[in-house]
Structures are given as structure tokens and as C-alpha cells.
């Protein structure tokens, strides 16, 4: 094999290696599964996967809301998270514990779930880093299973306490989408976030019109969150490794050429 042939072969190898490296950067989704953590009335419940935590906390518009049909009228307060094995995470909001009870039925089935009967329950998910969310999987549902997904695009950590759901939209939160009948989909899984947005904070709740016009029925969605899937936004395939390898190949070629020229 001549020197030129050998140089071309090695360059081809470098390109091939670069292609393989590039392909390996087309990352599969990471799945955060809430079947394992055992959480009972806690403030947070954490699933970990791929070295990244997905810390769920519960929220509902229970502050200054009175009566059992005041969904949307109150301000957000933290709530209590319960895990139900493979059924996933549910929420009992603070109005399950008032005297008299302001969200009637909230402490038992089916409102022990993330529901919108009486109050709008939502799970705030905080990832350790920005994630492009792709899937939301339910483990349990009853009656109806429409969900609402928001992501946080603000600079500083978001504060939910004391805000209304409608007000979140002017505080850096963006509606990613409403998704209907997730429980009826294959694997009870909705493909979400078609726009491919990334965020460290996501808000996933029983269907919530966010103060706007009602797209789906409200007051009848009861669901538990089994898992989330997504991709770290810093793992988007980048051409840099190929460029580096090609540059290395060219440099090697230049060195060879210079060496041959001196020979
Ligand atoms: Ca609930
Ligand atoms: Ca409720």
C-alpha cells in the first residue's frame, strides 16, 4: 500500500469513527420512573435516572379558595405527594385537611390522585438540568385523563406559592400543550412537547384551562404519574466531535506530507 493510499485509509477510518461517535450522540430518552420511590404525604418525591434527579412536588390552587367547586379561584400552595407503586404519583392537596373540608373527597379515591375536581392539582418536576421532555406516562386514571403541561422559560428559579395558575403565564411559564385521554393511549403514554422545548422545571397537571377558555371537560380528570421521558438538552447531537476528528486527520496528513517532503 502506498503512502497516499494509507493516508486516505486512515482518514477514512477517522471519518468513520467520527460518524460512529456522532451516531452515539443521538441519545435515547432517559426514563424517570416513579414506581420505585416510596413517598407518603411528603413534600417531594424523587426519581433518578441517567444521573439526573427528577424531583416532583405537589401543588394546588387551595389558598383563599372556599367551597368544593372553586377550582381556578385560589392561589397556589404546596400539597402532599403520595406514591402508589406502579400506579405512580398522586396528590392530596391542603383542602383535603381543612375543617370543614374545602375539597370534598380529596383525601380518598379517586381524588387522592392528581385531579381537577374541586381544585387543580399539578406536579412540579425539577430536573437537575434542562431536559427536553418527550413523554408523560400515567400508571392509573379514572373517568377522564386529560393533562396540561407547562415548562418554565424564566431565568431564576420559579416561585409557585401565592400565584394563580393563569398568572404563571406572565411569570416565565409557557403552555407546552393540553393532551386528551392519555389513559386511553398506548402504554398510557402521551408524546408531548412536539416543539422540542427544554427546561429544568415542568408543571404537569390534570387538565387546567389556566384561566382561559375551556378546551376539555374539567372536574373529571383523575390520574397518577408513572414516568417521564426526555433528553438532556446538552446532549443534542453536535458536529464538534466530527470537526475535531477531521481536524486531527488533516493535521496528521499535513505532518505526513511535511515529513515526506523532507524525506
Ligand atoms: Ca387530588
Ligand atoms: Ca380534588
Image: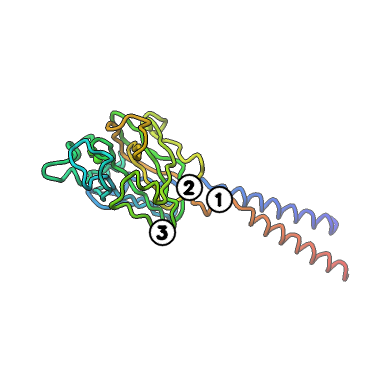
Judged by depth in the image, the label closer to the viewer, 3 or 1, is 3
**Which tag, 3 or 1, sits closer to the chain's start?**
3
Residue located beneath label 2 in the image: 132
Q: Residue 80 at what x, y percent from top left?
A: 24, 48
Asked whether mark 2 lies closer than 8 Å to ligand 1, one says: no
Q: Identify which residue, 259 or 174, lies in the foreground.
A: 174
Q: Earlier in the sequence, mark 2 or mark 1?
A: 2
Q: Which residue is mark 3?
A: 156
Picture disc at residue 236: 1
Q: Residues under labels 3 and 1: Cα distance?
A: 23 Å
Q: Which quadrant is the N terminus positioned in?
A: bottom right
Q: Residue at image x 17%, y 38%?
A: 67
Graded by Cα atoms within 10 Å as few (under 14), some (14 to 19) or many (20 or more), the crowding at tag 1 reads few
Instruction: Work out whether residue 208 or residue 141 is closer to the camera in this orientation and state it.
Output: 208
Q: Quadrant of residue 154?
A: bottom left
Q: Residue furthest bottom?
A: 262
Q: Are marks 2 and 3 in contact (CB under 8 Å)?
A: no
Closer-to-camera residue (260/91)? 91
Quarter of the rendered image showing ligand 1: top left
Q: Are marks 2 and 1 in contact (CB under 8 Å)?
A: yes
Residue at image coords 79%, 54%: 8
Identify the colour scheme used.
rainbow
Instruction: Check residue 53 in the rendering and tell me which mark sits there, or answer none.
Output: none
Which quadrant would the C terminus be assigned to in this image? bottom right
Residue 164 picture location, percent across and down: 31, 46
Q: Quadrant of residue 66?
A: top left
Residue 43 position (above or below residue 261): above
Amino acid at each position: 500500500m502506498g503512502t497516499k493510499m494509507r493516508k486516505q485509509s486512515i482518514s477514512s477510518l477517522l471519518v468513520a469513527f467520527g460518524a460512529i461517535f456522532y451516531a452515539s450522540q443521538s441519545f435515547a430518552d432517559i426514563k424517570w420512573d416513579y414506581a420505585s420511590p416510596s413517598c407518603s404525604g411528603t413534600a417531594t418525591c424523587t426519581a433518578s435516572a441517567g444521573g439526573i434527579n427528577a424531583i416532583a412536588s405537589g401543588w394546588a390552587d387551595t389558598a383563599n379558595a372556599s367551597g368544593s367547586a372553586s377550582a381556578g379561584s385560589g392561589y397556589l400552595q404546596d400539597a402532599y405527594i403520595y406514591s402508589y407503586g406502579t400506579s405512580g404519583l398522586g396528590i392530596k392537596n391542603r383542602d383535603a385537611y381543612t375543617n370543614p373540608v374545602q375539597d370534598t373527597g380529596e383525601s380518598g379515591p379517586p381524588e387522592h390522585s392528581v385531579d381537577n375536581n374541586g381544585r387543580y392539582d399539578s406536579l412540579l418536576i425539577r430536573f437537575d438540568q434542562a431536559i427536553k421532555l418527550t413523554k408523560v406516562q400515567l400508571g392509573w386514571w379514572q373517568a377522564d385523563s386529560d393533562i396540561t403541561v407547562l415548562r418554565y422559560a424564566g431565568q431564576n428559579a420559579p416561585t409557585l406559592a401565592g400565584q394563580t395558575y393563569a398568572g404563571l403565564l406572565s411569570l416565565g411559564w409557557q403552555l407546552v400543550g393540553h393532551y386528551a385521554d392519555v389513559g386511553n393511549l398506548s402504554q398510557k403514554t402521551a408524546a408531548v412537547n412536539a416543539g422540542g422545548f427544554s427546561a429544568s422545571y415542568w408543571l404537569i397537571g390534570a387538565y387546567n384551562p389556566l384561566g382561559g377558555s375551556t378546551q376539555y371537560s374539567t372536574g373529571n380528570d383523575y390520574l397518577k404519574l408513572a414516568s417521564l421521558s426526555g433528553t438532556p438538552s446538552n446532549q443534542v447531537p453536535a458536529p464538534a466531535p466530527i470537526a475535531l476528528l477531521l481536524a486531527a486527520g488533516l493535521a496528521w496528513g499535513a505532518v505526513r506530507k511535511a515529513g515526506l517532503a523532507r524525506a
